[in-house]
Image (cartoon, rainbow, N blue to C red):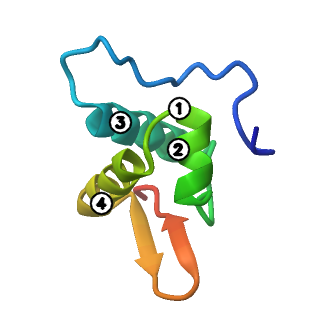
Amino acid sequence: MVPWAVSNMISMVDPDSPELAYIQLADALGKRIISGEITGRMPSERALAEEYGVAYGTVRRAMALLRERGLVESVHGRGTFATPPA
Protein backbone atom coordinates (compact mmCIF):
# COMPACT_ATOMS: atom_id res chain seq x y z
CA MET A 1 0.00 0.00 0.00
CA VAL A 2 1.26 3.48 -0.78
CA PRO A 3 2.01 5.68 2.27
CA TRP A 4 -0.67 8.32 1.64
CA ALA A 5 -3.41 5.80 0.83
CA VAL A 6 -6.63 5.78 2.77
CA SER A 7 -6.27 2.98 5.27
CA ASN A 8 -9.77 1.59 4.82
CA MET A 9 -9.75 1.85 1.01
CA ILE A 10 -13.25 3.39 0.88
CA SER A 11 -12.90 4.63 -2.70
CA MET A 12 -12.69 1.36 -4.58
CA VAL A 13 -14.01 1.07 -8.11
CA ASP A 14 -17.19 -1.04 -8.34
CA PRO A 15 -16.91 -3.55 -11.21
CA ASP A 16 -20.68 -4.16 -11.08
CA SER A 17 -21.56 -0.50 -11.60
CA PRO A 18 -23.01 0.55 -14.96
CA GLU A 19 -20.63 3.53 -14.85
CA LEU A 20 -17.28 2.96 -16.56
CA ALA A 21 -14.35 2.23 -14.25
CA TYR A 22 -12.24 5.18 -15.41
CA ILE A 23 -15.12 7.59 -14.70
CA GLN A 24 -15.61 6.09 -11.22
CA LEU A 25 -11.89 6.47 -10.59
CA ALA A 26 -11.79 10.06 -11.88
CA ASP A 27 -14.76 10.92 -9.65
CA ALA A 28 -13.13 9.33 -6.59
CA LEU A 29 -9.80 11.06 -7.19
CA GLY A 30 -11.54 14.34 -7.95
CA LYS A 31 -13.34 14.22 -4.59
CA ARG A 32 -10.03 13.58 -2.84
CA ILE A 33 -8.41 16.52 -4.64
CA ILE A 34 -11.30 18.91 -3.93
CA SER A 35 -11.41 17.88 -0.26
CA GLY A 36 -7.68 18.56 0.09
CA GLU A 37 -6.81 14.94 0.85
CA ILE A 38 -4.54 14.86 -2.19
CA THR A 39 -2.38 17.94 -2.71
CA GLY A 40 0.75 18.67 -4.66
CA ARG A 41 2.27 15.90 -6.71
CA MET A 42 -0.05 13.02 -7.53
CA PRO A 43 1.00 9.42 -6.87
CA SER A 44 2.26 7.52 -9.88
CA GLU A 45 -0.28 5.98 -12.22
CA ARG A 46 1.06 2.53 -11.35
CA ALA A 47 0.59 3.21 -7.61
CA LEU A 48 -2.97 4.40 -8.22
CA ALA A 49 -3.71 1.29 -10.30
CA GLU A 50 -2.51 -0.90 -7.44
CA GLU A 51 -4.41 1.07 -4.77
CA TYR A 52 -7.72 1.01 -6.64
CA GLY A 53 -7.32 -2.48 -8.09
CA VAL A 54 -7.67 -1.38 -11.71
CA ALA A 55 -5.61 -1.65 -14.88
CA TYR A 56 -2.94 0.93 -15.65
CA GLY A 57 -4.89 2.00 -18.77
CA THR A 58 -7.92 2.75 -16.59
CA VAL A 59 -5.82 5.12 -14.49
CA ARG A 60 -4.43 6.81 -17.61
CA ARG A 61 -7.96 7.45 -18.91
CA ALA A 62 -9.06 8.73 -15.48
CA MET A 63 -6.08 11.11 -15.35
CA ALA A 64 -6.93 12.41 -18.82
CA LEU A 65 -10.46 13.09 -17.61
CA LEU A 66 -9.13 14.90 -14.53
CA ARG A 67 -6.94 17.05 -16.80
CA GLU A 68 -10.04 17.92 -18.85
CA ARG A 69 -11.86 18.83 -15.63
CA GLY A 70 -8.94 21.06 -14.58
CA LEU A 71 -8.21 19.10 -11.41
CA VAL A 72 -4.71 17.95 -12.35
CA GLU A 73 -1.92 19.35 -14.45
CA SER A 74 0.89 17.31 -15.98
CA VAL A 75 4.35 18.83 -16.33
CA HIS A 76 6.67 16.95 -18.68
CA GLY A 77 9.58 15.49 -16.74
CA ARG A 78 8.17 16.51 -13.34
CA GLY A 79 4.91 14.62 -12.87
CA THR A 80 1.23 15.27 -12.40
CA PHE A 81 0.03 17.75 -9.81
CA ALA A 82 -3.34 18.27 -8.12
CA THR A 83 -4.83 21.66 -8.95
CA PRO A 84 -7.98 21.99 -6.82
CA PRO A 85 -10.41 24.75 -7.74
CA ALA A 86 -9.85 28.05 -5.92
Reading the image, the residue beneath label 2 is 49
Viewer-side label of 4, 2: 2
In which quadrant will I find the C terminus? bottom left
Q: Are marks 1 and 4 in contact (CB under 8 Å)?
A: no
Viewer-side label of 1, 3: 1
- Mark 4 to mark 2: distance in Å? 14 Å
Residue 74, above or below 38:
below
Reading the image, the residue beneath label 3 is 27
Reading the image, the residue beneath label 1 is 53
Q: Earlier in the sequence, mark 4 or mark 3?
A: 3
Query: Residue at (36%, 52%) from the top-left corner?
Result: 57
Viewer-side label of 4, 3: 4
Residue projecting furthest to the right: 3
Q: Earlier in the sequence, mark 1 or mark 3?
A: 3
Q: Secondary structure at mark 1?
A: loop
Q: Secondary structure at mark 3?
A: helix
- Badge 2 amino acid: Ala
Q: Earlier in the sequence, mark 4 or mark 2?
A: 2
- Mark 2 to mark 3: distance in Å? 15 Å
Q: Earlier in the sequence, mark 2 or mark 3?
A: 3
Q: Are marks 4 and 3 in contact (CB under 8 Å)?
A: no
List x then y, in percent, for residue 56: 44, 50
